[in-house]
Amino acid sequence: MQKPEPPSPRFEATVSELIDESEFSLGTSKAALVQTLKIPTQVLPEERADNARRDLRALSFVTIDGEDAKDFDDAVYVERRKEGFRLWVAISDVAHYVPEGSALDLHARTRATSVYLINRVLPMLPERLSNQMCSLLPGQERLCLVADMVLDAQGRFLETEIYPALIQSAARLTYEAVQSCFEGRPPKALRPFLPMLENARLLASRLHALRAKRGALELQLSERRLEVDAQGNPSQIRLSRQLESHRLIEAFMLRANEAVARYAERRGLPVLFRCHGAPDDKKLRFFSKAVGAMGFSMDKPNPRAFSQLLGSVRGKPEERLLEHLLLRSMSQALYVAKNEGHYGLGSSAYLHFTAPIRRYPDLWTHRILKAHWAQKRLPAEERALSELGRHCSEREHMAMRLERDVVSCGGAYVAQKHLGKSFEGTLVGFAKRGCFIELDGLWVEGLLRLKELGRAAYFDEANYCFVLPNGRNLQLGMRCVVRIHEVYARLGYVRLKCVSLPQEVSKGPKEGRKSKKFSKVAS
């Protein structure tokens, strides 16, 4: 077993190193900060009197976010109507405070996205703007762009208007508090909002059913959340699952994004569409092999079939693994100048409108809408728009890698505390040099080298499994017992030793069986 590493630097220092190695910076340009200081701290009288803005302060909008959220860029209000529902989605008018070509705009465009790390945020816009004047704080007047949608009883569009407005959020709600309402335990402070929340809940259920009917993928991924102690060092990883309240807001944001995409496409506006292509044949073959090795099959790979497969394992141990395998098999969504549809959502037109505080494409959408309403000249050069789309897509993927690297390093810090201990785990992936095991309780992935399984062990690509020296197959989803053997926390690397494998390891993908009994392996 590896000797313990010398005391590691504080995790914050490790995160700083990862940020330095990425192309994201901690600071904001001096010119952008100076511009931010000139932004007023409240809505000005002339802004309030602007006839182009509809006054929606009488509507009891609410924001619904996580307990630790600091910027609130979306608020919602729902009414029941004879024909179905009316849904207002109000989004902070960030473009009002970030003129095109300004220092703030150049800073936001360069960064293109906010990055959410464990113990810090690298905001696209300075916090004075994102957490204050562009944040829909309760009781504060705020400028917004609103997607105002009249929907039928199934959630289909009947009428849609997009316009600038003035709102005043009535309350800042959390996902957890709203979930308590749905479970019959409403906090006293939320009781005045119960009728609206019930309307919202019913509409969200109709929107989910509508998406399922058109073949959208329904993923309910459990995310790994790294928690830190008072010193800022990783203490544990928890799995967080989506609540019904999360899915409610997701449904409303998706509908608003679709509404604005349809609006922009019909008018030929130069927006960036959010497009997602079908997975290529190679990725589909990978997924088919992987699920086949686990004993599952699909007649024809398509979003509806994927959703049916996931529905069949909902709540079962295989659910988490299948969802992550499917996610790895999908193409990456991109920002593009021409609408190409969204495969995963089953949508013919989709863009990003609902998060201009943290995503530049959303800010761009707002700017184009406002220019259209003001009858100003719109940037029409498709090549420049395509280049902006490529830049925003690249920055998004870089941010995702940085966020993933921080969680991996944090997980290794957690594993280091358990050096030499044994854990049960699940085989979740293969590599040429070995297989990856996710450890129960720690939710950390470690590498079990191929040589740990015997010199004659090899990877059978056709059946997507490891063939052991005794001719048996080791497949995805199988359980084993491993020991944490080496940890290099700053690299996010955890190496495992095999303690025991299932006594019954299948002879092939069709015979895949799992056993709770384990047999020891020499290590």
Image (cartoon, rainbow, N blue to C red):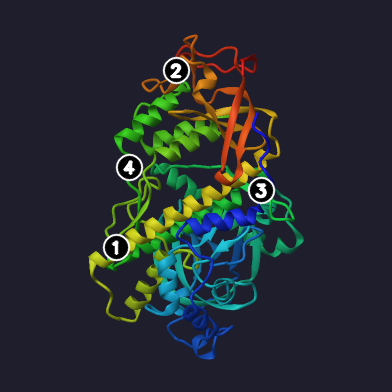
- Classify 249 as above or below 105: above
Give x and y (percent) for residue 252: 50, 57
Of pointers 4 and 3, the one earlier in the residue sequence: 3
Residue ID for mark 2: 509
Instruction: Tell me if label 1 and label 4 are in contact, CB under 8 Å.
Output: no
| Location of residue 339 by image quarter | bottom left
Q: Amino acid at mark 2?
A: Pro
Q: Position of residue 396 (x, y in %)?
A: 43, 56
**Residue 382 drawn above or below residue 460:** below
Q: Quadrant of the N terminus?
A: top right
Neighbor class of circle 4 (other Cα within 10 Å; few <14, some 14-19, many 20+) is: some
Of the 4 image quadrants, the one containing the C terminus is: top right
Residue 520 higher or lower than 425, as above or below: above
Give the image quarter of residue 509: top left
Nearer to us: label 1 or label 2? 1
- Quick one: SS at disc 4? loop
Which residue in the protein does label 3 denote?
8
